[in-house]
Amino acid sequence: MKLRLNLATAPQPNNRPFLAGAALTGTIALLAFALLSHAAYASWRASRELRADTARWQDQIRRDQQRRQDLESYFRSAAAKQVLDRSEFLNSLISERSFPWTKVFMDLEDTLPPGVRVVSISPKLVNGRAEVTLEVGAETDASKIQFLEAIEKSKVFSGMVVKDEKRTEQGAIGDKIVLNLTVWYSTT
């Protein structure tokens, strides 16, 4: 049988609990390091795709800005201004040609009282609105006033301005009063 005797003056300390605790803490730290490394790698990989998308969008923005600058310089050129002015003129001609004459005459027919007739009518497009200049002949002051009140109450005519009023002894067809006026006509 073997007998264990400690002949030292101080007993040998037992380091096993410390070594076991250090090994357990090291293992936990190693697992935490592995998990955090994996999370950092996954985050870097996901953000790599976002960085690539961001770079692609920034390139697109730079190309679009360059194209915009090229277009702005082109539209500032004399040739482009000439084309734009010509197209604006042609569009105004088209708008004047597309004036709803039939609708205007129908609306005037509804507002003209007896004894009043339209001598001349001239539409003009001003800022997208139709300004109509009318020359109207009336037989009496009462019919003139009826016509002016009918224009003021009308839903399609607005902003009436009487420019001139002429009185004659006897007009060509019995018009004693000739009015020149402008009104705004609503084409809607």
Image (cartoon, rainbow, N blue to C red):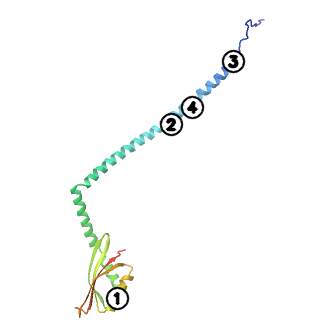
Image coordinates for residue 140, horizontal then vertical, percent: 30, 92
- Foreground: disc 1 or disc 3: 1
| Inter-mark Cα distance, 1 to 2 | 84 Å
Question: Could you tell me which secondary element the residue under label 2 belongs to?
Answer: helix
The relative height of residue 121 versus residue 174 in the rendered view (above or below) is above
Sooner in the amino-acid sequence: mark 1 or mark 3: 3
- Foreground: disc 4 or disc 1: 1
Q: Along the horizontal axis of the image, is 65 left or right of 47? A: left
- Residue receiving disc 1: 145
Marks 4,1: beta carbons within 8 A: no
The residue lying furthest to the right in this view is 1
Image coordinates for residue 134, horizontal then vertical, percent: 28, 81
Sooner in the amino-acid sequence: mark 4 or mark 3: 3
Identified by mark 3, the residue type is Arg
Q: Residues within 10 Å of mark 4 (few under 14, many from 20)?
A: few
Identified by mark 2, the residue type is Ser
Sooner in the amino-acid sequence: mark 4 or mark 1: 4
Q: Quadrant of residue 25?
A: top right
Q: Quadrant of residue 110?
A: bottom left
- Foreground: disc 4 or disc 3: 3
Q: Quadrant of residue 1?
A: top right
Sooner in the amino-acid sequence: mark 1 or mark 2: 2
Q: Residues within 10 Å of mark 1 (few under 14, many from 20)?
A: few
Is residue 141 something that shows in the picture?
Answer: yes
Image coordinates for residue 97, horizontal then vertical, percent: 26, 73
- Residue receiving disc 2: 43
- Residue placed at 54% from the left, 34% from the top? 39
- Residue receiving disc 3: 16
| Inter-mark Cα distance, 2 to 4 | 12 Å
- Residue receiving disc 4: 35
The relative height of residue 79 versus residue 151 in the rendered view (above or below) is above
